[in-house]
Amino acid sequence: MRAVILVVVLVAGCGGAAPPAERAAGDSTHMDRPVWTGDVSEEAFAALHRLSAAEVPPLEGDTIDLADGTRAYLALPEGPGPHPAVLVIHEWWGLNDHIRHWADRLAADGYAALAVDLYGGRIATEPDDAMALMREVDEDRALTTLRAAVAALEAHPAIDAERRAVVGWCFGGGWSLAGAIAIEGFDAVVVYYGRPVTEPERLRELDGPLLGIFANEDTAIPPPRVDAFAEALEEAGVAHEILRFDAVHAFANPSNARYDQAAASEAWEAVRRLLARTLRPSEGGA
């Protein structure tokens, strides 16, 4: 679908820094770099997130090494496969056990789920730390990690990476979109209230349909921004569905203390329908 390689300038949805130059170890210049927080200040953005203290069920996957030196969490379904693949991108806290559990949930649905780590092994439990980790995310390195994750999926004998999707929440929602724009071959893209892209020419790089999940009471990504995103997708000719819930930002984040069970469950069923339709059509996905 691509005539040229797209250089992505989007760094992260739901927070993210402008691409920095290479920094020496210990360099703290990233602390002065702005992060994208939508239509609110960094302080107000941080207040939209509360970390859940709920315990996660026992995890069933394994940690694997990627070719770029990072580590990822792989959850496989039962049976020999090959299983269709879902790339999972964490929210702003990092690759914690809540995200790993979500990969397990995808595996229970029959997908090989690989949850990447864009924070280099670090996990935040306080908003200030999460903001600092987002500032350190380097665009080129993050895309290298995503490409390494796709390569790992392609190399695994139990995975059919030719059938693949990507899903992310908030920070990860923005990277879900950015990754699908920059990397060919994603059959479906799920963006949970990630930073929208409103340039149709960039959205034309998407290879599969997009499901966008947003909150009507989200002050960081308010309805007018979502409207502009939907209009750009329409102009780009990208098949898409935009769902809007009467909820607050991050209402469906796996790690969110203010998780909205009803809205999150409805959104998740839409995700499951999209994955079944695009990744498992021969099995009756509708």
Image (cartoon, rainbow, N blue to C red):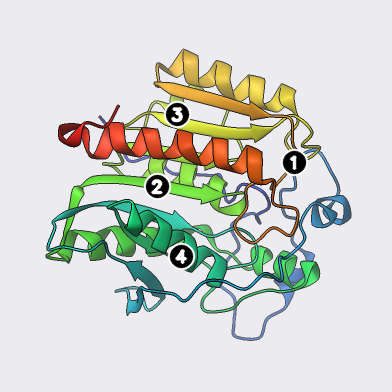
SS state under label 2: strand
Residue indicated by mark 4: 141
Front position among marks 3 and 2: 2
Q: Which residue is at 34% across, 57% downward?
A: 108
For the residues marked 3 and 2, what is the alpha-carbon distance in whole angstroms? 15 Å
First in sequence, mark 2 or 4: give its number: 4
For the residues marked 4 and 1, what is the alpha-carbon distance in whole angstroms? 23 Å
SS state under label 3: helix
> Mark 3 packing: few (<14 Cα in 10 Å), some, or many (20+)?
many
Indicate the position of residue 114 as horizontal and vertical percent values.
36, 62
Q: Nearer the viewer, residue 32 or 258?
A: 258
Residue indicated by mark 3: 203
Residue indicated by mark 2: 166
First in sequence, mark 4 or 1: give its number: 1
Q: Nearer the viewer, residue 275 or 239?
A: 275
Q: Amino acid at mark 2?
A: Val
